[in-house]
Image (spheres, helix red, strand yellow):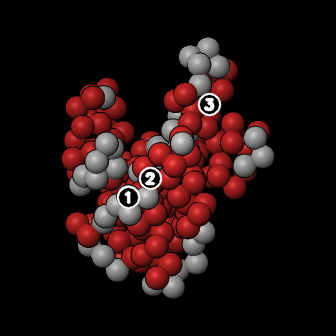
Amino acid sequence: MADVAAFLAARLKARGAVIDARLAETAALLHDVDKSFPLEDPRRAAGHGRAGAAWLADQGWGDLAGPVGGHPVGRLLDHEGEAPGWLARLPLEALVVAYADKRAAQHLEPMRARFARWRADHPDRDGQLARAWIRAEELEQYLCDAAGIAPGGVRRLRWAGRAVARARR
């Protein structure tokens, strides 16, 4: 996911957008940090994304909290019913992290395929995911337009794996 976020941030920056690429990439690397918390950790009660954001803020990395907290698909529904232009009111770094999460699993895939898998894995959330899909399409169009690419043009920079391997040595 960080590779996709890095690609998008670089494209946006090249087109003149004001974006902290390092913040977007770092938040993408840490977006699922709360999944590593023990099951009994009380922070888990805040829910996925929010729990990680709270932990990051507690560690003194509050700048990462927003993008990490806002990445889960359900958070798209926080903006349900908002007037057009809702995306322009959100930090670009948070949008990049949220969108990269909708495109990258173990590999880069179309957003439609990712949503189909979520719907198959969580049939109890089908209605929520169907509504989130509407906002996700708006997010995809907004970012791809700003980056000057079609959704099929989204790529990975493939830097994160090399960076992690270097850190392990």
Distance of label 2 from label 1 (alpha carbons): 8 Å
Q: Earlier in the sequence, mark 1 or mark 3?
A: 3
User: What is the number of the mark on residue 69?
Assistant: none
Vertical position of residue 97 compared to residue 131: above or below:
below
Which residue is disc 1 drawn over? 158
Name the front one of labels 2 and 1.
2
Bin the neighbour count of mark 3 within 10 Å (Cα to Cα): few under 14, some 14-19, many 20 and up: few
Three-letter amino acid code of the residue under disc 2: Arg
> Residue at 33% across / 44% down in the picture?
105
Vertical position of residue 108 compared to residue 117: above or below:
below
Which residue is disc 3 drawn over? 46
Residue 147 picture quarter: bottom left
> Residue at 57% across / 54% down in the picture?
26
> Residue at 69% across / 36% down in the picture?
55
Residue 150 picture quarter: bottom left
Three-letter amino acid code of the residue under disc 1: Arg
> Residue at 57% across / 32% down in the picture?
34
Q: Secondary structure at mark 1?
A: loop
Please say if the residues under marks 2 and 1 sit with CB atoms less than 8 Å apart.
yes
Name the front one of labels 1 and 3.
1
Which residue is disc 2 drawn over? 162
Query: Which quadrant: the C terminus?
Result: top right
Please say if the residues under marks 3 and 2 sit with CB atoms less than 8 Å apart.
no
Distance of label 1 from label 3 (alpha carbons): 32 Å
Closer to the camera in the image, 23 or 160 = 160
Q: In this rendering, would 22 be left or right of 155?
A: right
**Extreme residue toward the top, this view:** 40
